[in-house]
Image (cartoon, coloured by chain):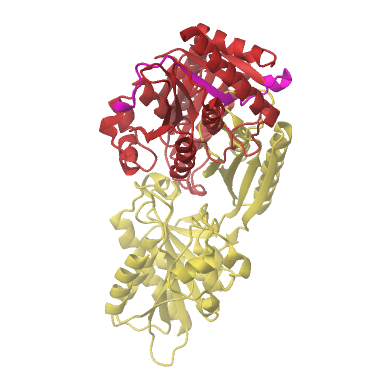
Chain colours: A yellow, B red
Amino acid sequence: MRDVHARLAAWMTRLGMSVRVDAAGNLRGVHPAAPSTVRRLLIGSHLDTVARAGAFDGVLGVVLGIALVQLLGRRQHPFSIEVVGFSDEEGVRFGVPFIGSRALAGTIDRDLLERRDTSGRSVAEAIRDYGLDPDAISEARVADAIGYLELHIEQGPVLERLNAALGIVTAIAGQTRAQVTFTGMAGHAGTTPMRGRRDALAGAAEWIGAVERDAQGVTGLVATIAHVEVEPGAGNVIARRCRATIDIRHADDGVRADAARRMAATAKEIASRRGLDIEWEPRLDQGTVAMDPALTAMLERAVVRSGTPLHRVASGAGHDAMIMAARMPAAMLFLRSPGGISHHPDESVMEEDVAAALAAGLNFLDELAGTLS
Amino acid sequence: MRDVHARLAAWMTRLGMSVRVDAAGNLRGVHPAAPSTVRRLLIGSHLDTVARAGAFDGVLGVVLGIALVQLLGRRQHPFSIEVVGFSDEEGVRFGVPFIGSRALAGTIDRDLLERRDTSGRSVAEAIRDYGLDPDAISEARVADAIGYLELHIEQGPVLERLNAALGIVTAIAGQTRAQVTFTGMAGHAGTTPMRGRRDALAGAAEWIGAVERDAQGVTGLVATIAHVEVEPGAGNVIARRCRATIDIRHADDGVRADAARRMAATAKEIASRRGLDIEWEPRLDQGTVAMDPALTAMLERAVVRSGTPLHRVASGAGHDAMIMAARMPAAMLFLRSPGGISHHPDESVMEEDVAAALAAGLNFLDELAGTLS
């Protein structure tokens, strides 16, 4: 993170932007407007990634924000532009996503600061370890911006199937995340008969299969179990505990809530039948978030003016824009993901799509300037 | 390991035993016989444990070996006694059990020395890290002993159900261990539809369920999957790879081999149907090992003479005795495991059973002396 901060900050500084890192570890660079103008537009995305990730999820949107400032050159708009590189969107370390954008939205609370990673280190301690002050986190908050624009790869196959370079995001699908822990009884793999075992991993495996079948049966529903820890984890010791994460998404909040209830009930039924204890700890319950109609209409006009066909899509992935939308008008532009591949080293983006996004982005800044002048 | 070596070596030294650590990290103490006697009896068990283990699995047998030497006092037998505390029986670090006893049996080969732990460190490097010389491992070999006696907790419920303090082990059930790796395709949990996913963890979970049902259907068969690693392991990234261990045991080698073949075929079928790659890497294929009839008969007479009722049991757990039995006569005595609990902090042993084992052990030494004089 320090390396990417150093490289992007150097670039922003060369462009005359004033750069700082806020108390949540977000990299922030301001391109000033004409003197006495207090209006500010935010353009941002995140700088963190999942493990073994691709090269574009997140950072591309930050790079494009700075590139837009560079392309603006000496042109002055009636608003300053603050480019934000969020510190933690994926939630890899603490199991809670959007920490960076929550700081800007002012929705970081004591609970979040005290959440701990697997080594027992809290968010507040991690912030301190990085050399920042968690007690100053409220200074990261933005109360007065006129809007938030995010450019991001789609991370799915929809635009490619439409043969479209860009997509206007209408809404971001809600997500439920939880940690689910099955606890049974350890025992010797060679001397404990199959009947009477209380095998936490066998229970979790049955549940993983049930969740998969459930989600396959509901149109548009996705449910993913992708992180599993087994204790003690020795090949010859029956699993005493199995901890799994679940990630459930659907564009309709009611469908998602029903699915989460069913999947929790299934876990309980399986655990009870197998003599296991079960714990379902909510980690996130984020409703579907619509983008701002007025700002999105400007983005649509900007795309059309740049000569790129207009396509509207819903986002299956969560984005910082859903957090920012609670505090200010937010709009989001997707770039096509070749093969729909993301969260994988093969993740890519096409140069002509990046050019189209920059052209649309410049037009968007003009559109916004027109409404303000 | 250094701590337990220090404590046991100090005790052995006080008893006049000569103590060393061989090139495989086994602690070895010799109680000499009358001058000019070259015969040697080995008494041993292992000093390592699984993670979050109990306090008796392994080390009790080493402690009882030293206690027998102490109880012998000034009595001299026509054989020396070498008490061995094996360094690695459980196979936790390298996925291969019995490293300590294999060194005494002379069955450590280049492949084993080059096997690596999850951090990439090899057995040879681990031996060097400990301050020992893997090139000198052949010096650990024992070619000339008259027999091997192991005392160990049963780790199962059989003796308790028989209301028996001690059990004579007739044979040690064979085991198959393998590492099974499912490889699919990572993808974003929110944007990748359920149909068309190649989810390595979902495949592994289906297989874990199938293995459990299979083993439940065959009398005496146990199959355990108790170690699972998922890559990349982030909650919002579909699992690209899932690596699991399997442990299969049965007293009949044919039944065990058939089960291993079926479970591998099931893994292949599941992987193929789900578009996953599958790898089945054998880690152990250990046949059922019978204990030595003559030495076991002496042990039986010793138990009867000590006034403890005679019970014969087969061992579902593997023991160093099965490795030693390939090179010399081996016999094994079980102590009752309360609740059948082992590989768990609640593992225990009853003081009166320990007293019965020591009485039987002293009688065994007398029996053996009688046959040699």
Q: Is residue B163 magenta?
A: yes
Q: Is residue A131 above or below residue A170?
A: below
From the viewer's perspective, is A213 left or right of B19? Answer: right
Magenta part of the protein: which range?
B139-165
Q: Is residue A371 above or below residue B348?
A: below
Can residue A306 be seen at all in this image of the molecule?
no
Q: Is residue A10 above or below residue B269?
A: below
Where's the N terminus of chain A, which quadrant? bottom left
Give the percent coordinates (x, y) of residue B336.
66, 24
Give the percent coordinates (x, y) of residue A77.
39, 82
Res B121 quadrant in image: top left
Can residue A47 be seen at all in this image of the molecule?
yes
Where's the C terminus of chain A, which quadrant? bottom left
Q: Residue furthest bottom?
A: A36
Give the percent coordinates (x, y) of residue B177.
46, 24
Of residues B177 and B210, the one drawn nearer to the viewer in this rendering? B177
Res A368 quadrant in image: bottom left
From the viewer's perspective, is A148 left or right of A258? Answer: left
Of residues A199 and A91, the one drawn nearer to the viewer in this rendering? A199
Of residues A52 and B69, the one drawn nearer to the viewer in this rendering? B69
